[in-house]
Amino acid sequence: MPIVRLRKHDYWSAEITWSTPRKWYRIKGYTGVNLPVMLKNKYGIYKFEGHYENGNKLLYIGIAYCQNFDTRLHQSRNNLKYLKASNITVSTGQIDLGSFKYTRKRFEEIEKILIYFMEPHLNIKKTIWCPHDCFFEIINSGKRGLLPKRIVYPVANISYMK
């Protein structure tokens, strides 16, 4: 029997549309990314990916809720300082919750689910806990990189023993 999600009406639906990855840079102690003007004042979720000779790695996932992408991404990123800046890209994801209310709690639940299941290398918080009181179907579209197309949390695996 296939794995199916629980009752459809119990799920929050979230579609994250990911932007084209942009190069992360460090110049004389200043780190950042040149975002397109249309993304600078937007809110949502972001991810850092490292690109290495032996493959790509998801490095970090975070949210920009009270601060827009431009402000959030230009804050000090000490957890990236030991990595080669030329090998790091950042993508922003705008979250569409449809008719559901946009709240910090919803953004954090999405962030926690992505961190929990994707295990980004540099996320040290929110790694051992996944929300137990929310039900999400997350669709990643656009330039999603290493992220899966779809995450349904939680699901039920139903089998009948004979």
Image (cartoon, helix red, strand yellow):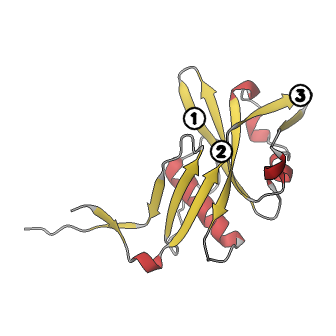
Residue 8 in percent (x, y) is at 41, 75
In the rendered view, would you say 88 is above or below 122? above
Count neighbours of disc 2 (C-alpha within 10 A) and say few if under 14, some if 14 to 19, many if 20 or more: many
Q: Amino acid at mark 3?
A: Ile
Residue that badge 1 annotates: 57
Quadrant holding the C terminus: bottom left
Residue that badge 3 annotates: 27
Q: Is residue 145 left or right of residue 62?
A: left
- Snapshot quadrant of residue 25: top right
Residue drawn at x 70%, y 32% is: 88
Q: Is residue 73 left or right of residue 92?
A: right
Q: Secondary structure at mark 2?
A: strand
- The one nearer the camera, 113 or 11, is 11
Residue 120 in percent (x, y) is at 59, 44
Q: Secondary structure at mark 1?
A: strand
Mark 1–mark 2 Cα distance, whole angstroms, equals 9 Å
Residue drawn at x 89%, y 28% is: 27
Residue drawn at x 83%, y 38% is: 34
Q: Amino acid at mark 1?
A: Lys
Q: Secondary structure at mark 3?
A: strand
Residue that badge 2 annotates: 60
Q: Amino acid at mark 2?
A: Tyr
